[in-house]
Structures are given as structure tokens and as C-alpha cells.
Image (cartoon, rainbow, N blue to C red):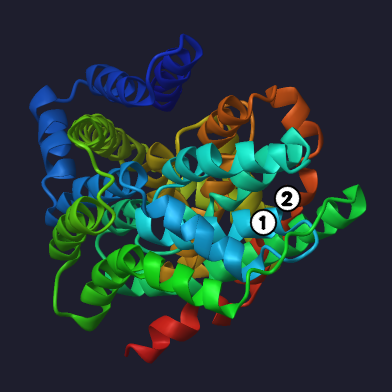
Amino acid sequence: MGLAVLFGIFGFGLFCGMPVAFALGLAAVGGFFYEGLPLFIGFQRILSGVSVFSLLAIPFFIFAGELMMQGGIANRLVRLAASAVGSLRGGLGVVNVLSSMLFGGISGSAVADTSALGSILIPVMKDKGYDPDYAVNVTVTSSVAGVVIPPSHNMILYAVAAGGMSVSKLFIAGIVPGVLMCLCLAIVAYWVAVRRGYPAETFPGFKALGIATLVALPGLMTAVIIVGGVLSGVMTVTESGAFGAIWAILVTTFVYRELTWPAFKNAVLTSVRTTALVMMLVATASAFSYMLALYRVPELLGNFVTGISDNPIIILLLINLILLVLGMIMDMAALILICTPIFLPVAVSLGMDPIQFGVILMMNLGLGLCTPPVGACLFVGCVVGKVRIEQAVKTIMPFYLAILVALMLVTYVPAFSMTLPGLME
């Protein structure tokens, strides 16, 4: 009965349009009252949830991403991608995917990727004769790279929810799966472009490509500083995030000279709002997870999943299916904090490394950002592209399938996510 009260209050809050963080907190409080537990335990869980040093890296990553979006780094990365692959048939679609891979690997945010690159590329693609739904679909789905390719603040949330693990190994584990996913999306983008008869751009020449690379290099160095600092052991995740934010300020102010004072203030305000939302989710999800553990939900759900089949292939497929459905109806950060303690033990019992499961979780929930009814990236992309959601969803299925192909490969072939972390040992 207590479990029904917990999920009943949570579901009612979501149904009423309550923010996920508030719904989680209210459900946890309701569970404490129902069980007659002292409320100070709930406050202890809330405080312990956010009293983790690694979480300090999140505001730095978010701030660095906002600075790069406001300060012109995204423009340089788009020009680099256009110079490299724009000459392909329907090349702007492939340019979009490559730009997302480059920018996502710097900003670490799928929504920032959709907003920044969508504002640049979608109008250009429409002017060049590309259909609006195609431009939006490529932009939205390729933005998932931002949560897989390092640095990703969502991976830090997973590391915390999993009880603490090597963030550097998580980061490096996402490189190959992220590139694989972008490769699958680029193939689909090219295939759809050929079928629709989209034009090809003129190759600007290797000199122009070299210039575009040099111009984009200071921006690309942001990712090198953040990821390289962590992987080399020179800096902690938090320190690398701070240095990355400082570097982004220097590049956008003194090199590109596009970061104005109003843009800087906007980046600060947006980062503060986003960080507050994430931290509130972490805090309330910690109390909610305490109640889940009290009611033995991870054990019960694990028994349910393993009771359906003893075949690891079927069990992993079922876990992926559940995560995909949940990703369609809930916020990514909240799902990471709720689903990790539930499904990670099941995956580990099947012999899966927690690092590999973390990458699978990112890809699953990242796809949820692109799907209705609550896909944040889908909403942003449709607003930027001035396309109705129904129109975009009608033609987005090939791009969903591309991500699913990459997801299945990463799920059943551990080498995609575990080879590079294995080299660190």
C-alpha cells in the first residue's frame, strides 16, 4: 500500500503539471508520513544528495556551454563542418550531424546543441531548398550526441546515482558510442537527402578547410581542456569544468570577440536557472530513492524482469524498452537518478559493467529528449524551425531507427563502450 501511495502522489503531481522535482519531493514526503518516519531523515537524504563534490562540476559545464553558445564558437564549428563534408549530396544534413558531434562534445547539453546549432543551420537549410521537417529532424536527433560524447554533466549525475565511480572512465566510454551514433545518423541523413533530391554544395578547397580548422581550433580546445584534464589525471572533474569555463570566457571575449556584456549576463542567468533545476532534482530524487529502497523496488522490479526470461539478450532488450518508454514521459535528469539504482543491479547481475550500462542509459534517455510527448529537444527544434510537432514526427522515424541501431550495438557489443576505458587500466 505504501508503494501505491508513493507512486500515486508522484503520478498525480505529474498529471497536474507539477515540475518533476516538486512531484518527487511531495511523493517522498507523503511516503514518510504514511510510514510514520521522522521527517528529519528526509531532510538528511535531501542534503546528502547534493553534498557531493563531483556535482560542483555541473554548473561549470553548463556555464561553459552557455558561453560557447553566446560567444560564437558554434558558428565556427558549423563552418568547419561545412568545409569538410558540405560537398556531399544533401551535405548540409551531414554538416548538421558533424556540427552536433563537435559542439555536443564541448557543451555537453543536447538542448543547448539543438538551440545553438538549430538557430544557425535550420534557416540556412530551408533557404537552400531543404524541407523544414528534414532540417528539424536532423538537428533534433543529432543533438543526442551532447549527452553521450564527453563532457556530459548527465554522466556525472549517473556516477553519483551509481554510488560513485570513475567519471573519467565514463567520459572516455562515451566517445566511440557517440561517434557511432552520429555515423548512423549521417548515413540516414544522406540517404533521405538523396531520396528527396537535395542539392550538394561546392567543395571550398583544402585551403578553406585548413583556415576553418584553425579558426575553430580555440573553441575545440575547450573540450580538450575539460576532457583531457580529467583523463590525464591533472585535474578533477570539477577543476576541469572550472578551467573550461575560464577558457570559454577568454576565447569568446578576446579571440572571437563576440561575447557582449548582455550575452554574458544572459549566460550567467540561464546557467543559474538550469543548475538550480538540476540540483533540486538531485535533492528530491535522493529522498524519493530512499523510499524506493525502503519498499525494495529495485529488488522487486529486478525479480519481475528476470522472471520474464532468463535469457540475457531478452532481459537487456526489455530494460532498453522500459527506459525508452520512460524517456518519452519524464525528464532525463530525474530518470537517471531514479532508474540507476533500479536497473543497474539487474545489468550487473547479467555480467554488464556499470560503465557500459551508463552509456546505454545516456543513449536511451537521450533519445527520449527527441520523442513526444515531453521531448525538450523536439520542442526546441520545432520552435526554431517553425514546424508543427506532428509534421516533424511524421518523417522522423528513420532517424530514430539510426539511434536505435547504435543503441543495440552498444548494448550487445561491449567493445564499443569498454575498449577505451580498458586502455586506462
Residue 121 lies, in percent from the top left, at 58, 44
Q: Is residue 314 shown to the viewer in this render?
A: no
Instruction: Give the residue displayed 33% in from the left and 88% down from the top.
Output: 424
Residue 44 lies, in percent from the top left, at 10, 36
Residue 359 lies, in percent from the top left, at 48, 63
Which is nearer the eye, 46 or 359?
359
Furthest toward the top, the residue is 16
Q: Image height check: is 95 above or below 374? A: below
Other-residue count near label 1 (Cα within 10 Å), few / some / many at <14 / 14–19 / ≥20 = many
Q: Which amino acid type is shown beneath numbered disc 2?
A: Phe
Query: What label does residue 399 carry, if any?
Result: 2
Instruction: Give the residue displayed 62% in from the left and 26% down from the top.
Output: 373
Q: Quadrant of the N terminus?
A: top left
Mark 1 element type? helix
Q: Which quadrant of the structure image shows residue 232?
A: bottom left
Give the residue at mark 1. Answer: 403
